[in-house]
Image (tube, grey):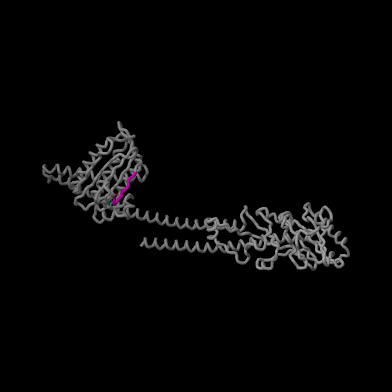
Amino acid sequence: MSNLFSRVSTAAVLLALITLSVFQYQWVKSSAEKDLIELYKNISFRIYSAISEEFSYYPLFSNRYDDFKNLNSESELRSKLTDLFAISNNYDENQYINSISYIRVGEDSRNYFSYSSEGWRELSEFPIDSEFDKPGPSLIPDSADTTKVWIFLPLRTMIKDLRIQIVIHFDLFSFYKNNIEQKITTLSDVYELKWHYKSSDEIMEPLKEYNYIYSPFKVLKNKFLSIDSPKYIEVPLHVIMFNVDDGRARLYYESVKDRHLKQGLNAYVSVYDDGIPLIQSKEYNLTLQWILSLLLLLGIGIAYLIILYQINRLKQLRLREKEFVATVTHELRTPLTVIHSAADNIKSGIVTPERIEQYGHLITDQSARLSSMIEGILLFSRLEGKVEQSPITKNVYFNEIEKDLQVFSQTLEKDFNKRISIDFGSLAASAVTDRDTIELILTNLISNSAKHAYNLKTEGEIRVKGHVQLPHTLIFTVEDDGAGIEKSEKKHIFEPFFRGDHSFKNQIKGSGLGLYLSFRKAKLLGGSLYVKSPYERADGRIRKGSRFTLTLPYHAGKGEDNS
Ligand code: ADP
């Protein structure tokens, strides 16, 4: 029931997290699109307003060109043009007008006159070609110096029967850079603005105001595959148009939708953040935020699963503790009852003198069983309370351990009908280690093989071996050819109170503490204990029983050489 509950709640939480991440993706996507378009509009608006304001003050653009319409002589034109040059270039410390020229178009002649700081001069030809009869673009980029433009004043001036075209060589981008950026310091302090031209076929799609699409996946893909797909905030600057009616410069710009209307002039300002096109850098940041929030959701999911796992573990532990109390009570009561009734029989004189010795053995055996049980429980509580210290190691002779194990094995062999072989031949004579720990672990492993591996009383073999793996390891193995340990049980057998299904069903005596205590004791001595079941023997054959391996650090004993 509780298992079903935890499965259902896990599924519900996972489903909730997945739904949440889908919503969160949609939200990130749509709010990013909204924000970036807003940013685009905001930036372009501020640039346009700054330009518009600047134009209304700067003499070249704010000048009323009506005066140019009613000219009587060329000298009048020249004086007006030199005035315009002077007042515009004296407007601030920067001189943006390089020259003011006019082209005199006669019946079949053309003359070019140019005024600069060096005065008037006639040019044999004009630096750019222009078809004066067409209402061409009012600005033409200077191919020799890309920061400059030729501004064609579109007013058609006549002096007598001569047509006059006024052309101004103007440093447009320096003008923008100095005057406009100063006006929008809040923008230009944070971002870098680059003013530039593009020819018609160079124009990339700038951020579209109407259908900008942000996809974090695409950003990630491009980033990982190092695909450079810069997205600029590019504000088109089709700004200088002269209103023919009042002869003033007007701020004009086209929206992306009207792009096809544009001819020739493509002045842009691109916005960069830390050297990266602004939109791209915003997209990186948004994608990073998106990944972080996704990781947060993932973290919540993982934390939930961990908590659920811990709760289940605790539940299992509680259950095993209960079983342990029941088993231990039974285990303690049995020898006590035997001792009690043996003592009763002796006391009441019903035991004949010949059988007294047998009763003595019985009482000794049962009290040994009782005390080993109590020892186990005490050790468990010491280990759990973390008061058990690492044992003090001293010189230990392995033949002494071997003798103890042999004595221990004799009773088991009799009781369980098993053959137990102990081979310490490959061990050194002695080592600095802890005899009690080794004996506790090996006796536990041997009795486990005798109790759990085979059916009671069926024959079986248990092999105990020890060897030194130079330079630093002592290895003991206990193998049987029994039933082995189920995969699902294998991961639990070193946990406290765990007892296999088989032990329960067959009512095999035990507490479920043996392997846990052995494992912890091995760790306290700096070693390890693990199991392989089934396992491979030296001859390469696979055995379906179990092989427990105890490894301990090897420090050569007195008179031994561990090199
Ligand atoms: P106990 O022997 O008191 O049940 P242990 O901690 O010593 O507790 O062992 C835990 C469980 O591991 C046993 O109940 C048994 O299911 C399994 N086990 C241990 N050794 C073997 C073995 N050699 N073969 C099969 N099962 C084993």
Majority secondary structure in the magenta region: strand
Residue at horizontal 86 percent and vertical 68 percent from the top: 161
Q: Residue furthest top?
A: 559
Q: Measuring 12% from the left and 45% from the top, which residue is drawn there?
A: 351
Of 77 and 495, nearer the camera is 77
Q: Residue, x 87% and y 62% (percent of image)? A: 74
Residue 213: name its quadrant: bottom right
- Give the x, y percent position of residue 210: 62, 67
Provide residue 65's location: percent of width, then percent of height: 82, 64
In this view of the protein, can residue 288 be seen by the observer? no
Q: Which residues are magenta?
A: 528-535
Q: Is residue 516 left or right of residue 148?
A: left
**Furthest residue in direction front, as rendered:** 108
534 in magenta? yes
Q: Nearer the viewer, residue 373 or 75?
A: 75
Q: Is residue 55 magenta?
A: no
Within the image, what quadrant is residue 33 found in? Answer: bottom right
**Coordinates of residue 359 in the picture (x, y in percent):** 16, 44
Left or right, 515 with reference to 151: left
Can residue 438 be seen from the camera position used here?
A: yes
Reply above or below: 241 against 447.
below
The vertical placement of 13 against 329, above or below, is below
Q: Nearer the viewer, residue 465 or 264?
A: 264
Q: Is residue 467 above or below residue 107?
A: above
The quadrant of the rendering that contains the N terminus is: bottom left
Q: Quadrant of the C terminus?
A: top left
